[in-house]
Amino acid sequence: MYYADQNKTYYPNFYSQDERFRLIANNPVAGAKFFKMMVDLFLKHVLGINSKNRGLYGDTSGYYGTVEQQGRLTLHLHMLLWIANSLTPQEVRDRLLDPTSDFQTRMVQYLESVHMGEFTTGTMEQVQSVLEKEAALHPNRIPSTLTLPKAAPEQCITHHNTQDNTCKKCQASLTWWEQFKTIVDEILFKSNRHKCHSGCTDPKYNSCKARFPRDVFVETAINPETGSLNIKKGEAWLNTFTDILTYLMRCNTDVTSLLSGTAIKSTVAYVTDYITKTPLKTHTMFEAIKTVFNRNSEFINGNLSCQEKTRKLMIQIVNTLTVQGEVGGPMACMYLLGHPDHYTSHMFRPFFWKAFVHEANKSWEQPQLEDSGDVMMDKVILHKVNGNVIGLSPVMDYLMRPTIFKDMCLYDWIRLITKRKMSKSEKSRIKYTSESDNDMDVDSLTEDDAMDVDDVLSHSDDMAMVDDPLDCNYFPEGKRNGKLQKVIQFLKGHPQWSTHTFTVSDESAGKVPCFVGGTIPRPDSGDRGEYCLAMLTLFRPWRSGLDLKLEGESWEDAFHGYKFTQRQQDIMKFFNIRYECNEMQ
Ligand SMILES: [Zn+2]
Ligand SMILES: [Zn+2]
């Protein structure tokens, strides 16, 4: 209301519901601004990102959230949260079933504190009757959904854990928590209850598409056979939530702990795919097209020319689809304000991986008929340097990477290395003669520095350098212990040998490669050789495809013969989760 209104100073002014709707509908910028403020506050104070306090759910190791518009066009966010040091569902299961450990008790305690499913002060009916009585007694009372949260009083250190009835600090704390419970229940009642409506009812089965009412569990129980966990949930008409989050956000928030591989996979697919989804779902499109046909049955059967009928139908279909795909005011404002449409802790880097695999395979293929047309072309960017046109490609960058990175696999190269222009001082530190560089033959120089296969094998155990490239004695600013460091350059013959150098990120700032241009081959189906070739291309350092296997060796044998690190094996395992996620949908 403050963002939408004309007033410069903030004072609580509780307009009627109708006035509130009018104000916010006329000012979608306010809605977008307020939404961003709430997300930023959530990230900082609840997840503990860039903050002194720890996260409400534990230390946050990563998050990814996508902004959506709801039916009424207001913005909302679906966010996945990764908690540092958390276990996989399988590990959780194994430990839950271990009778000798207190893991079970502690896990249940943790889950019940963040994943709640019932009112605290009574049943839904009791909460309702208390709220109705309160409204009758104090008709002017402002509902908690319109007020700001009150900070908790300072904790009493003297009576920590004991509580003393005569102590003022203890009393203040008790009162605050009592109010907290009442307020949380009020907000839940007003904004978290599911009420079935025409939109959620499936007429065919006469059931709710949102799966309400939900199953109720009197107490948290572990199935000793399967290790599956049903967390206590008393209210069938509520989604699960965290009370503190409800208290802070004062609106509808749902919090779910993803306790099974299935739940994790389908949610991951939903949230991560949303960013690439078109606003139009396929079934909505077909429905819209069908409506156009139904509406026009008369003129379709009429005596207009076929061409004329088609033209009319096409125009109507395009119009209908345009209306369906409309972006709402708040979302349009979000983009205009330059606010993000997704929030994440990680940086992503597009990775056109196929060109690399193609390059690796090329060295082993029989020379094909020239220009057969189906050869995948490597993407080459043309640059003009000193009046000469040169071709650059990410593949060439990797193949001609500096000697200092010779043991770095492609996957790490994409994650950790950024090419950049040399600074003036860096340029002055390298000796170069541009004339001779440009004359050099790229291919002959690649071979100059290419390692033979034995060399690669002898280095394969020595992955420390790959894990921490800063061990390479290289510092971006060029100075270490007061001594000038050598400027890192491409191998001689690379067109940017004399102009570009590199910035190396450490692990924590590494980017996540975003595989573009086709899906990665899978280990469990499709061409086995293709899979092995792709994995070797990614994880075994190479300058030529010849480094990746021996003459006469199959890609599969080369794959099994190569010692991948544990981390690399984990990453390969994760690649496949992507498919499993999609199969869940
Ligand atoms: Zn006290
Ligand atoms: Zn329903």
Image (cartoon, helix red, strand yellow):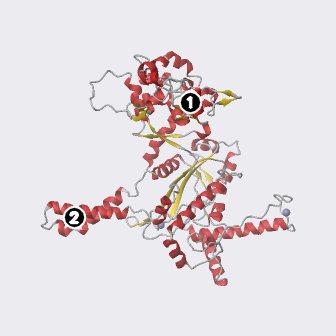
* Label total for image: 2
Quarter assignment of residue 85 = top right
Mark pair 2, 1: CA separation:
64 Å
* Depth order, front residue of 523/548: 548
Side of 561 relative to 98 (left or right): left
Residue marked by disc 2: 312
In this view, the residue in front, 373 or 324, is: 373
Inspect this view and state whether residue 525 appears.
no
Q: Position of residue 375 (x, y in %)?
A: 32, 31
Q: In this picture, is 81 found above or below 418?
A: below
In this view, the mark in front (2 or 1): 1
Asked if residue 306 shows in the view, the reply is: yes
* Left/right of residue 70 with respect to residue 503 in the rendered view: left
Element type at mark 2: helix
User: Which of 340 and 189 lies nearest the eye of the viewer?
Assistant: 340
The disc label shown at residue 229, or none: none
Residue 244 location, x and y as percent?
Answer: 66, 61
Q: What residue type is labelled 1?
A: Lys
Query: Residue at the spot x=53%, y=17% of the render?
Result: 455
Residue 496 position, x and y percent, is 48, 30
CA neighbours of label 2 inside 10 A, class few (<14), some (14 to 19), many (20+)? few
Query: Nearest the camera: 387 or 274?
Result: 387
Type of the residue with mark 2: Lys
Image position of 149 with respect to 477: above or below: below
What kind of element bears circle 1?
Answer: helix
Q: Quadrant of the N terminus?
A: bottom right
Vertical comparison of 452 with 90: above or below: above
Q: What residue is shown at x 42% (from left), y 35% (from top)? A: 383
Looking at the picture, how far across and down is residue 542, in whole percent?
48, 24
According to the picture, the residue beneath numbered tag 1 turns out to be 427
Report crowding for label 1: few under 14, some 14 to 19, many 20 or more residues within 10 A (C-alpha). Answer: some
